[in-house]
Image: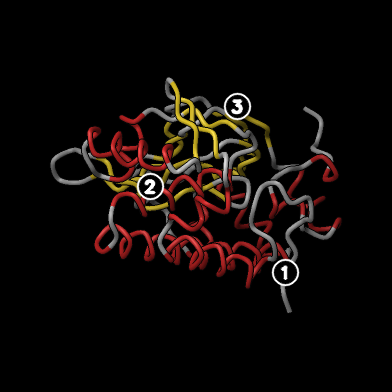
Amino acid sequence: MSRPIQATVRNRILAALPAAEFALIAEHLTRVELALGESLHRAGDKIGNVFFVESGFISALTMLSDGQPLEIGLIGSEGVAGVSVILGATASYSETMCQTGGDAFRIPASALKDVAARAPHLHDLLLRYTHVFHVQVAQTAACNAHHDLGQRLARWLLAAHDRSSVAELSLTQDLIAVMLGVRRSTVSIAAGTLQKAGVIRYHHGKITVTDRVGLENAACECYEAVAGEYRALFGEYRHDVAAAVTPQA
């Protein structure tokens, strides 16, 4: 299988690597397709592979005692699923499930740790991303506890929109309800309110953000807290900006 060409890579961490470091990791990367509903890691299982997301987005889910999943974070082309191996973890705390189809570069966890030990820029970017992901998890917990569903839904849609490479998101109300830990009927009401406000268009499981600024105004401060932290460490955050991620001094 041919090695990936860095100029065509969409994962922002891989795209930002110096050429010499990209060459080190490229020989271990395998492009894989991600299927809707596919689990990349199960909670408690050994992390055998790490995934640098190219397109689509993945939910990190914690499994509650009643068997219900609750989303604690989103991973898209800005990040990596299974990045905790860099901190020494061997088993996954959460389940990582693909919420859309897409693709990624897969690398064995052992190979990533070996390359990161020889590639200081890669190691730095992975640690920066781990920090930002932990900020996202903490802010999500605060958001779920203190903000109303309309604000939370707007925040979640913005996060999904940032990580998606398409204008139209295929998201059922049942899926959103599971992700936010609420009833489907309340999601329907909140989505209807956002649609009446003209910030989204929702039809047959398809959501299109029609007014990005309006959706940001409808969200709580939790969206900007996470996006701002990402910008502080990496640069621009949203998917529709062409500039590559670069470490900040």
Q: Is 200 positioned to the left or the right of 127 in the image?
A: left
Q: Position of residue 90 (x, y in %)?
A: 42, 54
Q: Residues within 10 Å of mark 1 (few under 14, many from 20)?
A: some
Q: Is residue 116 above or below residue 65?
A: below
Q: Is residue 243 above or below residue 239?
A: below
Q: Is 176 positioned to the left or the right of 232 in the image?
A: left
Q: Which residue is mark 3?
A: 33
**Colouring rule applied to residues:** secondary structure
Q: Which of the numbered marks, if any, corresponds to residue 153?
A: 2
Choose mark 3 or mark 2, whichever is in front.
Answer: 2
Residue lying at the far bottom in this picture: please name it. Answer: 249
Please report the residue visible at 52 percent of the width from the left and 48 percent of the height from the top.
Answer: 75
Q: SS class of the residue under badge 1?
A: loop
Q: Position of residue 200 (x, y in %)?
A: 49, 38
Front position in the image: 22 or 169: 169
- Amino acid type indicated by mark 1: Pro
Q: Name the quadrant containing residue 116.
A: bottom right
Q: SS class of the residue under badge 3?
A: strand
Spatial CA span between label 1 and label 2: 31 Å
Q: Is residue 208 above or below residue 19?
A: above
- Amino acid type indicated by mark 3: Glu
Sequence-earlier tag: 1 or 3: 3
